Image: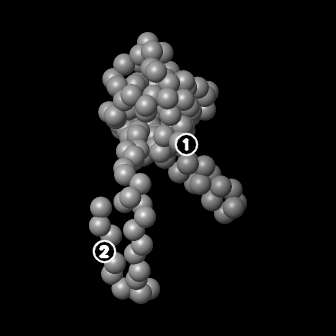
Amino acid sequence: MAKSVLVSLTLLAWIMSFLQQGDSLQFTKQPQSVVLWPLVGGTTLDCRTDSSFTTYTWLYNDVTLDRAVPEFKYRNHVNGSLKLFGVKEYANYRTDLLRFQCVASDDYGTIISNTATVSLAYLDSYPAAARERQVYGIPGNTALLSC
């Protein structure tokens, strides 16, 4: 009898905690900002919620990605991930940030993630003479590298 009461109380506590959570959709994983080296050319932004019945769309610079016609290629996975590739070519003529937000929807509502930025990092070419300098140092000490 004590065992059945314990099982009943455990079940009741689980049901109560479930009901207190309500039906609101919540993120379990939001996209993170990243600095992308153009030679790599791509990255993946992840988005997950606590619901099994979530549909995901993405905003690119505040416009639905499907309508934004970005200069790079992408794949929007059913599990919420957004795979970006072809960013290398995009980086050749753009220096601004790429801003993304995940939009998650289910029967109970829609939520929008934090903004994740994809920054494109590159190094302009510089004179070859600057590369020929040798710098000597002692491990553990400070070294000055001039440009």
Q: Give the labeled residue for mark 1.
A: 40
Q: Amino acid at mark 1?
A: Val
Give the x, y percent position of residue 43: 53, 39
Q: Could you say whether the residue bearing mark 2 is in a helix, strand or loop?
A: loop
| Count of numbered labels shown in the rendering | 2
Question: Closer to the observer: label 2 or label 1?
Answer: 2
Instruction: Determine if residue 18 is in view.
Output: no
Image quarter (top left, top right, bottom left or bottom right) of the N terminus: bottom right
Q: How is the image coloured?
A: one colour
Front one among 43 and 21: 43
Q: Give the labeled residue for mark 2.
A: 144
Q: Amino acid at mark 2?
A: Leu
Give the x, y percent position of residue 2: 66, 63
Quarter where residue 55 is shown: top right
Q: Give above or below for 9 relative to 25.
A: below
Image quarter (top left, top right, bottom left or bottom right) of the C terminus: bottom left
Q: Give above or below for 138 relative to 52.
A: below
Q: Could you say whether the residue bearing mark 1 is in a helix, strand or loop?
A: loop
Quarter where residue 74 is shown: top right
Front one among 101 and 56: 101
Q: Looking at the image, which residue is at 39% across and 68% down?
A: 133
Q: Looking at the image, which residue is at 46% across and 21% down?
A: 71
Q: Earlier in the sequence, mark 2 or mark 1?
A: 1
Q: What is the distance, in whole Å, between disc 2 and disc 1 at their CAs?
A: 30 Å
Q: Is residue 56 left or right of residue 52?
A: left
Give the x, y percent position of residue 19: 47, 39
Q: Looking at the image, which residue is at 50% across and 24% down?
A: 72
Front one among 99 and 93: 93
